[in-house]
Amino acid sequence: MNLLLSMSMIIILISNIFMILSMILSKKSFMDREKNSPFECGFDPKSSARLPFSLHFFLITVIFLIFDIEIALIFPFIVSFNLVNIIPLTKISFFFLIMLLIGLYHEWNQNMLNWTS
């Protein structure tokens, strides 16, 4: 028990020494306003948070996430075609693709894919 306690104290002491040394020896300047401020999509964090934001950026992000999840769900279908019975898997994947195409058609009708409107 004493060995475990002494080793823990040594590890804590060494890690604290390294943290203090890195803080002393680092060349980071804390005087630069731009480097200290967080970067949020090109907005200045020191100004008002209620600036107008284009809805197209949000819609493009949502569409990207939907198609990203689509790819993550389609890849296991491709891999499992060789492992299981192909008829039920084909029906499931066909239904999934039809749902995605209906969603794409709806986005097209709502002009979400048209950047200029």
Image (cartoon, grey):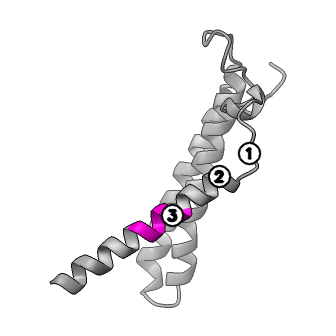
What residue span does the magenta drawing correspond to?
13-18
The residue tagged with tag 1: helix, strand or loop? loop
Q: Is residue 93 left or right of residue 39?
A: left
Q: In percent of the image, x 43 and y 87: which residue is there?
A: 84
Q: In percent of the image, x 77 and y 30: which residue is there?
A: 32
Give the residue at the far left of this rendering: 1
Mark 2 = which residue? 24
Q: Position of residue 57 (x, y in %)?
A: 71, 29
Task: Please tell me which residue lies in front, 17 or 66.
Answer: 17
Mark 1 = which residue? 28
Q: Position of residue 19 (x, y in %)?
A: 54, 59
Task: Please tell me which residue lies in front, 51 or 74.
Answer: 51
* Image position of 41 with respect to 69: above or below: above
* Amino acid type of the residue that numbered disc 1 sits on in the rendered structure: Lys
**Is 113 covered by the magenta stretch?**
no
Q: Quadrant of the N terminus?
A: bottom left
Q: Residues within 10 Å of mark 3 (few under 14, many from 20)?
A: few
